[in-house]
Image (cartoon, rainbow, N blue to C red):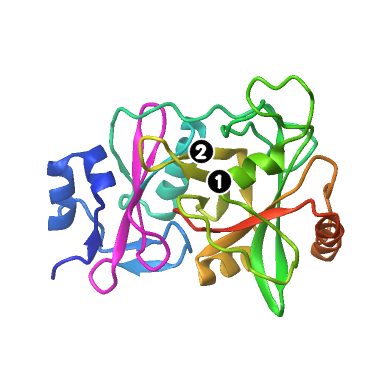
Amino acid sequence: MPRMLDVSDEVRSEIGDDEADRLLGGDRAPDSYECTSCRTPGDTHVEPTSTVLFVGDETAVLAFAHARCIPSQVVPVSEEQLAGAVRSISQSQPGGPGLAVPTAVPHAPAPAPASPAGPAPTQPSTPGQAAILGVTCGLVLHGKVGRASLVVEPTGPVGRPGSTSGEDEFLDLLQDAGFQPVTDLDETPDQLPGWSVLVAMGKLHAVLQPAAAGGSTGWWQAHQPLQVTDAWRMAASQLSEVTMYAVPAGMVGRQPREDLLRQALERAVALGQVVAASLPLAGT
């Protein structure tokens, strides 16, 4: 029985035509797998399946996902994250679906040191001075629907390249990239083309932005992948997207509960200090 497997041109160019053809022919593809996005079982014989290639500094790992969860694509990650993914794949799918593929790939953005300013802070690769970003996960109600959301807040002002004024231009930089000001927290922002959120092996790994040469590159990467709640992951999987909110330094802070997070966001919205976009899920 033929396999319902999708190997995108992007993945094919990384693993080569011979390997791609072996996958499509069934020689290197599993019959069953655990979806790298929703972590539920999948079957390549009965449902469309995506190949997702995670590339590190020196190696790459091929994983499988329901096509309804994420499309076939190449996802850049750090070598440390890749090693964690290999361990997770090996534990959950012994002897099978994780396929190590040596390949030359660009270096992933280097993570910044850990900081108490927020969960898994790192250095953004978007234009602007280096800044440590805190990222908080939570469900934010849009009307009566809980949306999987990220709140991104730097530890200090973020300026444009070459700026020495100390002026915070973090929101302006994101608006230049397509994020929109928020005036009503109950409204779902438009989806931003080219941007996406990487949830791999049940953990939040990165926010990806369009790369100049095509494909995606890391805008934010977790210093260590963040464990998300089952409710957050299910909400993200059901809608295949995550709402990302961004605020200036000191505007929201670390909130221990989702109701307090919403209250802090509402105060920031009233001050005109929130931009947001809906970002599709990008791979496990």
Q: Residue at x 68, y 70 (%)?
A: 187
Closer to the chain start, of discs 1 and 2, is 1
Q: Is residue 26 visible?
A: no
* Dot 2 crowding, Cα within 10 Å, few <14, some 14–19, many 20+: many
Q: Where is residue 140 shown, x and y percent of the image?
A: 72, 66
Query: In the rendering, which numbered label is found on residue 267?
Result: none
Q: Residue at x 78, y 43 (%)?
A: 248
Q: Where is residue 170 shown, x and y percent of the image?
A: 70, 38
Q: Amino acid at mark 2?
A: Gly
For label 2, the residue is 218
Quarter of the rendering occupied by the N terminus: bottom left
Say which quarter of the image contains residue 127: top right
For label 1, the residue is 207
Q: Is residue 116 visible?
A: yes
Q: Which residues fall within the magenta stretch? A: 44-73
Q: Tag 1, which secondary structure?
A: strand
**Vertical position of residue 84 compared to residue 149: above or below:** above
Residue sitting nearer the eye, 7 or 182: 182
Q: Amino acid at mark 1?
A: Val
Q: Residue at x 26, y 38 (%)?
A: 14
Q: Tag 2, which secondary structure?
A: strand
